[in-house]
Amino acid sequence: MINAQQTSIDAYYSLINLSGKRKEVYDAINSLETACNLDIAYYLKWSINRITPRVKELRELDLVEEDRRAKTFRTGKTVIYWKIK
């Protein structure tokens, strides 16, 4: 029998049920390894307004977490970089 924490099990089932825009954003973060919302927007060629809500949903599903806060070369502003849990 595999001994896994319930949060890990819940995250696994959340991942299986990902579809549409959430899945595309999840896959983008996974491909980029760590990315801010603007990086994801450039990667997917989407507006930032389509990215931000999807990242929030992925955080609520406990699939994505903050990696660090740093200045992005794109704007020079400090942003949050996300990574897959």
Image (spheres, rainbow, N blue to C red):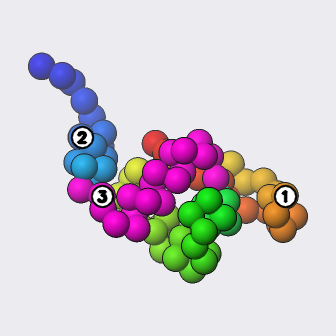
- In-front residue for pair 28/10: 28
Amino acid type of disc 1? Answer: Phe
Q: What residue do we see at 44% from left, 59% from top?
A: 24
Q: What residue do we see at 25% from left, 30% from top?
A: 4
Mark 3 vs 1, N-terminal side? 3
Mark yes or no: residue 72 visible: yes
Give the foreground label among 2 and 3: 3
Figure check: 37 above or below 2: below
Task: Sort mark 2 into few (<14), some (14-19) or many (20+) by Cα contacts within 10 Å.
Answer: few
Secondary structure beneath label 3: loop
Q: Is 21 included in the stretch rendered in magenta?
A: yes
Which residue bears the numbered disc 3?
18
C-alpha distance separating marks 2 and 3:
15 Å
| The disc label shown at residue 38, or none | none
Give the foreground label among 2 and 1: 1
Amino acid type of disc 2? Answer: Ile
Which residue bears the numbered disc 1?
73
Which residue bears the numbered disc 2?
9
Is 68 situated left or right of 54 in this image?
A: right
Q: What residue do we see at 72% from left, 54% from top?
A: 69
Mark yes or no: residue 52 visible: no
Mark 2 vs 1, N-terminal side? 2
Q: What residue do we see at 24% from left, 40% from top?
A: 9
Q: Residue furthest front?
A: 45
Task: Decide whether the magenta segment is chiefly helix, strand or loop.
Answer: helix
The stretch in magenta equals 17-35
Amino acid type of disc 3? Answer: Leu
Is 63 situated left or right of 66 in this image?
A: left
